[in-house]
Image (tube, helix red, strand yellow):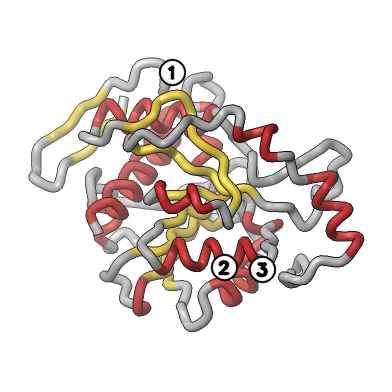
Amino acid sequence: MIVGTLRSGLSVLVLASGLTAGVVSATTAQETPRSRELRSLLEPSPSDYSQFNTPYDGRFTFARLMFTPLSSGGSFRRDLKWDHDYPRAERNFMRLLSEITTLDPYLDGGNVLAMDDPELFRYPVAYLSEPGYWTMTEAEEEGLRSYLLKGGFLIVDDFAGPDWYNFQLVVERLLPGHRIIPLDETHPMFDAFFHIESIEMAHPNYRGFWAQYFGVFEDNDPLGRPMMVINYNNDIGDYWEWSDTGWVPIEISNEAYKIGVNYIVYAMTH
């Protein structure tokens, strides 16, 4: 169960059935023959994921962004990075969002989109996993920049430690002149639906790191329209994915859900 307080002061007690049981190198937009080869090996063809996308019908639909990773991080398996926790994380999160808000989300997961896909503009909120490995082509950079400047909101998740350096370089190129602003519990984003008194979290995979939160805002105004929220040293998607298995503490998965709900509500109302 998730316990929170609505901004009106009314208490809310929600039973979410089945959900809560129990320095990489800088990237450039220029492609070399080797990078094209890697792209062909690592990036799925559109049919790999688009066959699972649901046609747009006006419902709120979770949109996950794909990219070609810098590397597989030494892994011998086909590790796309951006697909971590897919599709269980979005499926569980959308089910909970349907239970406790007036949004009418698509409940069977979400859609996977390229950053330069015109369809992206149909979805007000997008999600990006593992930005420590994030790369973009020129077309992808232009597409995502246009999406963010025209009203889109991006949740960045699942990275820690030195992953920050690649992420920062990509954001500086993507949104020149925009600052990455630290956030704490006093920001209204953490009081948009649930009243969250503490955003401290220590993800078990990121030992020695405590979660930090950042935002990118229109006109660099932290009370203005949010363009991006960043979960650094954290992975709330991981908690969404495993929340119905009993493998993660209920209290922490609850906090991850509450943070995610607040992100969506704040973005949709600002």
Q: Residues within 10 Å of mark 1 (few under 14, many from 20)?
A: some
- The local secondary structure at tag 1 comes to loop
Viewed as shown, does residue 15 lie left or right of 130?
left
Q: Which residue sits at x=38%, y=44%?
A: 260
Camera sees residue 56:
yes
Quarter of the image that includes the N terminus: top left
Q: Residues within 10 Å of mark 2 (few under 14, many from 20)?
A: some
Give residue 45's mark.
none
| Cα distance in 3D space between marks 3 and 2 | 6 Å
Mark 1 = which residue?
A: 21
Q: Are marks 3 and 1 in contact (CB under 8 Å)?
A: no
Give the number of the mark in front: 3 or 1: 3
Mark 2 = which residue?
A: 142
- The local secondary structure at tag 2 comes to helix
| Cα distance in 3D space between marks 3 and 1 | 44 Å
**Residue 44: which quarter of the image?**
top right
| Cα distance in 3D space between marks 1 and 2 | 42 Å
**Amino acid type, residue under disc 3 in the picture:** Glu
Which is more toward the observer, 125 or 249? Answer: 125
Q: Point out residue 231 in the picture as x, y percentages from the top left corner.
A: 49, 55
Viewed as shown, does residue 43 lie left or right of 230?
right
Give residue 138's mark.
3
Q: Are marks 3 and 2 in contact (CB under 8 Å)?
A: yes
Q: Are marks 1 and 2 in contact (CB under 8 Å)?
A: no
Which is more toward the observer, 16 or 2? Answer: 16
Q: Point out residue 35 in the picture as x, y percentages from the top left corner.
A: 85, 60
Q: Which residue sits at x=9%, y=37%?
A: 10
